[in-house]
Amino acid sequence: MDEDRIENQGRDRAAAGPQPNAAAAGAVALVTVETGTLAGARSADVERFLGIPFAAAPSGPLRWRPPQPAAAWPGQRAAVAFGNDCVQNRPQWDRMSSDLPLGEDCLYLNVWRPAQRAEAALPVMVWIHGGGFVMGSSGTPVLDGSAIARRGIVVVSFNYRLGRFGFFAHPVLSAAQHDEPLGNYGLMDQIAALRWVRRNIGAFGGDAGNITIFGDSAGGTSVLQLMAIDQARGLFHKAIAQSAGGRDPWPHLRRATHRPSAEAIGERFAREAGLREPTPEALRALPAELLRGGLDLVNMEPDTYSGPMIDGTLVTGPAAQAFAAGHHARVPLLSGFTSNELGDLPAPLRDMMVQRCLALLDLPRERIEALYGGAEGLSRGLVSDFPFAEPARHVAALCAAAGAPSFLYVFDYVVESLRTAVHGAAHATDVPYVFSTLTRLWPQATTADEAQSALMLDYWTQFARAGDPNCAGRPRWPVYRGDSMAFWFGQDGPALRALAATRLDAIEAARTAARN
């Protein structure tokens, strides 16, 4: 994609937004929100409203500013197509990516609801997409909310700024905007979307007093971080964190710790961009293509991209530290990870990640290898345990200790056609089961695979209704008690099984010692 296309797409999409004749284009479901009337699409059992602006386009003078209110529109606005994806790179290996236009004008959300009107307000589930804070979209086909809506839920998904557009700091921006939150603009977008949901979801038949946030990977990490952010308090009532982490050592806005500060990283980027005496105006005038760079999950450009940061206003530390201090929303939490998160990555990439994990643990490789039964076990196991399994158990235990219901799972189900080719359930493979969109990734999905999806839909939607996933006709999922037992979703049905406690205990002890 060329630079002009990135920069112009947002303006083109915004100009095409309000369409008084939307009903003639096939949009037959009408809803009025705070900024105007939306004309969505209706099928036999689901209505969908796509591409709803929840904030102004964060471009030009609004680049690296907190999200600002969206403008009202006259007449009916067509809500039958997704808005732009936020600027990013789309590697060929990412099977969950969308093919939507890219643009800085990307702060749109989507709503699915049952077509049949209910007498009472319906539970709401708000999805936060993953992608390492540098990739992802609410408009990918795998995230179609129709199946969840058919269960009597109002479903919302949204975009948030990514990469350097969403996470960037520089001393001149900090000086000019000292009275605003800084750096974590993508997280600010998430909070803005949740505030929009609280104000407007009643128009769609949703219950603003019964909102569940859920997400996977970076979206799951966002869920945990939102639980720890004061400004997000009261915007949701339950949380689901899938493969979330929550122990990540984010850089500080100004203070150098394990890596340079976010401001120092931003200064280096500005220098490499050719700005000798940067000003806020000069930074905001940088081409979108230059800011996008080569960022993706494999290439995080750590010298010139900070990622999310500890800004001292929204984010005061890793989510797990906030949980340990009791500074988090006491809401029911359903959390877990897949059985083989990253263990089937190509060996060179996996080995690079192992080295990073070992460096953060500060333990001799020989000692860790003994826990995993040798080099091969370490290579496949540590890249799942360190970023995902140990943090999930740790956070679930902290939540349980604080008195809120906590439910811990391991997803170990592999689609039937792939069982001889992989060593377990890979990262994010639980997502299409939750959304019942298996055939978008695996056209050969079987009846057994679809039954597994129906099982997870039952648990996830029941949790959204009541804060407890247990429902009639399904095996009982016990509340997590802070031990090493989890609810495993395997090939033979769900069952309570033990985690690899010895390995996780060693990782947790090393992390605790490193923090102290």
Image (spheres, rainbow, N blue to C red):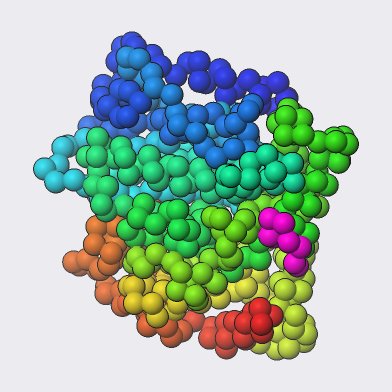
Residue that extends furthest to the left in the rendered view of this protein? 119
Task: Residue 480 in the image: state x and y as whole percent.
Answer: 37, 78
Q: Position of residue 4 (x, y in %)?
A: 70, 21
- Residue drawn 28% across the image and 64% down it: 467
The one of 102 and 395 positioned closer to us in this rendering: 395
Is residue 150 toward the left or the right of residue 429 in the image?
Answer: left
The region drawn magenta spans 251-258
Q: Which residue is at 51% across, 42% downward?
A: 189
Q: Quadrant of residue 455?
A: bottom left
Q: Would residue 437 appear left or right of 104 to someone viewing this image?
A: left
Does residue 385 lie above or below 299 as drawn? below
Q: Is residue 365 left or right of residue 504?
A: right
Most frequent secondary structure within the magenta stretch: loop
Q: How many marks?
A: 0
What percent of the width, then of the height, locates residue 139? 48, 37
Query: Which quadrant holds the C terminus?
Result: bottom right
Q: Residue at x 72, y 34 (%)?
A: 280
Whether residue 255 appears in magenta in the rendering, the answer is yes
Q: Which quarter of the rendering shows the N terminus?
A: top right
Depth check, front residue: 441 or 292: 292
Whether 252 is drawn above or below 180: the answer is below
- Whether residue 295 can be seen here: no
Q: Position of residue 285 (x, y in %)?
A: 73, 27
